[in-house]
Image (cartoon, grey):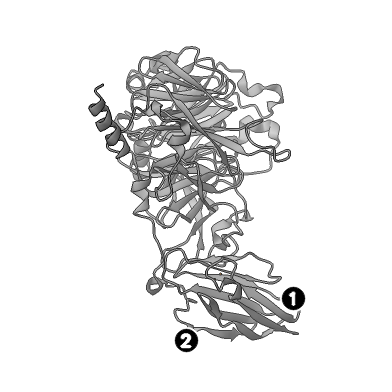
């Protein structure tokens, strides 16, 4: 290279006009986001047994926010404030904990659109909607007739439905029966939840299926639009795994559900309306006070009475993940005890249905012949294949739990191309848009269950890890070990530029329809109604009005309705009262939150702002006097 040309190239690189080949950058350079710059992607990782969703920036791996969903969160009062308590109502009572597994971004034409994020609850079956304007949970629906909602919340291409399904078969309807009579009483349900209308999330229908364990799902797109696929294991219907009964069979099933056909059956009245009780909790945008609406029935579709709604695709040994390629043509199963990765062809499946290439049937559900639907088996991929994501360049990436690696292959030719190690025991993996019709690719994020020897020891419990790879080049490049909160199961990511402009900065005070909102200090007051005392309080840098409250007696119930009357971005105020058996509140500009307190002894109790808001934050305080009853 001539010196002058070299200099010109150097200047162009320095000016950011030309980027050097990606492998030329070190991992540290690739994950470093300089001060003043933003991350390229938002990543949403489920918190597993912490019940929440955790938001990270990629490629930096920085934790940006925890969005409380199924677990109460004292950091901001979610589940404790009067406005959010009802979000945790279920037909089993108020449950301040959940197990969240699979986040899924809303989609338009099969592409994540950044409106909402959905997430399932695995213990007390529920699904939730997070509004990505506010990064807050706004809606939760309980799933009746289900035991452990794991195959959830996978989405149809225009966010028509999110899926839910029984992981553990249970007596349906619930009753007191001997567990040994599993085969007689235990059933499964595949549930479709209407998801495209905020505030109206509800169970559209449930399909009653044999008592297997339904594990994961993904929905079709393009040619396979109108279908969703659910894995099932324990088709042996064993009720105790001590005998490893559930893995005896050579093949279990992927259930292919034609939800367009289900819609027809519903429209034709081919369903059974079944009485039950389940909660729909919704936090509207105007008052922001969550309410529970108790629903009283669901529609059941019985496959026998709606032929064509479900087919079983035999799939090797206890399939776990099921993933549909971006073109919608291939369905990849993750047989966790299998030595191959089975890839089914959607076209072949449709032909097999047309030509009645059945191997049998169970409860009105035809079982298709394996050879008739199988496109190929990826040979010797790894040990324990689980989940698959796609990079949009014809490559599939499957996580392998037992061999702790990710296998990369051409899913049309069924040819292994590469492998990358994971440390250790990878569960799900994520590529931005990697389960959608148009993957953004670029990064791969395997999420690992075991992290021995990677991080500083923190006693018997270590953090879970996710490992970031750059997959934009010809060879995957390892970039970063990220520590995670809880147990991340699955994740979604979306380019930052799609979301950041939608993100709300403040709640407009003018639009606050909370009945106890106090929009100026002049309106602040204390109102007694029998034993209830309502404090209409304002917070602004750096005082509360009123800040001296008297006339409260033991036996009263005090409601502090605190409105943050700031209208500047990122000026929350906190609120806490000495001895109040609840949590702190964290009130955003323009928002009203309510802390309920039943004082139990006389005295003068300080309250204060818990969030450092100004130079006079420490002075942002007051007293409430409690007199004997
Ligand atoms: Cu308000 Cu600190």
Residue, disc 1: 600
Left or right, 617 with respect to 42, comes to right
- Mark 1 and mark 2: Cα distance apart in space: 30 Å
Residue tagged 2: 522
Q: Nearer the viewer, residue 199 or 50?
A: 50
Residue 317 point in image, percent of width and height:
55, 19
Percent x, y for residue 472? 37, 28
The answer to whether any part of residue 471 appears in the image is yes
**194 relative position to 556: left or right:** left
Position of 365 with respect to 240 (left or right) is left
Residue at left 71%, top 36%? 178
141 shown above or below 309: below
Is residue 206 at all visible to an observer of this figure? Answer: no
Q: Quadrant of the C terminus?
A: bottom right
Which sits earlier in the primary sequence, circle 1 or circle 2?
A: 2
Residue 322 versus residue 155 in the image, above or below? above
Whether label 1 lies within 8 Å of ligand 1 gets the answer no
Q: Residue at x 59, y 54 (%)?
A: 91
């Amino acid at each position: 290279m001539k010196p002058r040309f070299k200099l010109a190239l150097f200047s162009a690189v320095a000016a950011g006009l030309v980027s050097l080949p990606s492998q030329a950058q070190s991992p540290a350079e690739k994950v470093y986001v300089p001060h003043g710059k933003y991350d390229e992607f938002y990543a949403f990782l489920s918190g597993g047994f912490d019940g929440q969703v955790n938001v990270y920036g990629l490629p930096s791996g920085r934790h940006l926010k925890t969005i409380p969903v199924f677990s109460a969160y004292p950091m901001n009062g979610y589940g404790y404030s009067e406005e959010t308590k009802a979000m945790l109502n279920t037909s089993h009572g108020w449950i301040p904990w959940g197990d969240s597994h699979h986040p899924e971004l809303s989609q338009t034409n099969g592409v994540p659109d950044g409106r909402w994020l959905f997430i399932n609850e695995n213990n007390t079956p529920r699904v939730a909607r997070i509004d990505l304007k506010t990064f807050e949970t706004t809606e939760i629906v309980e799933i009746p007739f289900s035991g452990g909602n794991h195959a959830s919340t996978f989405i149809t291409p225009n966010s028509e439905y999110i899926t839910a399904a029984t992981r553990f078969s249970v007596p349906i309807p619930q009753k007191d029966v001997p567990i040994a009579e599993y085969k007689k009483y235990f059933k499964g349900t595949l549930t479709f939840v209407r998801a495209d209308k905020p505030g109206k999330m509800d169970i559209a229908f449930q399909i009653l299926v044999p008592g297997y364990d339904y594990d994961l799902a993904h929905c079709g797109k393009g040619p396979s639009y109108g279908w969703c696929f659910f894995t099932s294991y324990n088709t042996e219907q064993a009720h105790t795994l001590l005998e490893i009964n559930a893995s005896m069979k050579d093949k279990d099933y992927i259930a292919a559900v034609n939800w367009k056909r289900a819609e027809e059956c519903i429209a034709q009245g081919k369903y059974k309306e079944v009485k039950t009780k389940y909660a729909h909790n919704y936090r509207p945008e105007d008052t922001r006070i969550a309410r529970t609406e108790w629903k009283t029935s669901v529609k059941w579709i019985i496959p026998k009475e709606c032929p064509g709604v479900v087919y079983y695709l035999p799939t090797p040994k206890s399939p776990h993940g099921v993933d549909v390629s971006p073109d919608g043509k291939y369905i990849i199963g993750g047989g966790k005890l299998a030595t191959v990765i089975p890839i089914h062809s959607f076209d072949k499946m449709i032909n097999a249905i047309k030509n009645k290439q059945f191997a049998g049937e169970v409860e009105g559900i035809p079982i298709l012949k394996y050879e008739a639907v199988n496109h190929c088996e990826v040979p010797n991929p790894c040990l324990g294949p689980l989940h698959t994501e796609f990079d949009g360049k014809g490559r599939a990436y499957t996580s392998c739990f037992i061999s702790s690696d990710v296998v990369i292959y051409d899913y049309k030719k069924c040819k292994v191309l590469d492998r990358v190690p994971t440390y250790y025991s990878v569960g799900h993996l994520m590529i931005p848009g990697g389960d959608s019709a148009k993957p953004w690719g670029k990064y791969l994020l395997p999420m690992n269950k075991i992290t021995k020897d990677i991080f500083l020891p923190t006693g018997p419990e270590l953090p879970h890890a996710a490992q970031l790879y750059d997959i934009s080049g010809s060879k995957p490049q390892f970039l970063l070990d990220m520590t995670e909160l809880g147990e991340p199961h699955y994740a979604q990511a979306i380019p930052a530029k799609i979301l950041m402009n939608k993100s709300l900065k403040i709640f407009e005070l003018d639009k606050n329809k909370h009945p106890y909102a106090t929009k100026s200090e002049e309106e602040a007051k204390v109102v007694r109604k029998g034993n209830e005392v309502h404090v209409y309080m304002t917070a602004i840098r750096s005082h509360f009005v009123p800040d001296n409250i008297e006339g409260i007696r033991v036996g009263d119930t005090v409601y502090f309705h605190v409105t943050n009357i700031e209208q500047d971005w990122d000026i929350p105020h906190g609120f806490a009262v000495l001895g109040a058996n609840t949590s702190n509140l964290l009130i955003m500009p323009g928002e009203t939150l309510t802390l309920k307190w039943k004082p139990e002894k006389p005295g003068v109790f300080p309250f204060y702002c818990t969030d450092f808001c100004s130079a006079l934050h420490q002075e942002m305080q007051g007293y409430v006097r409690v007199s004997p009853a």
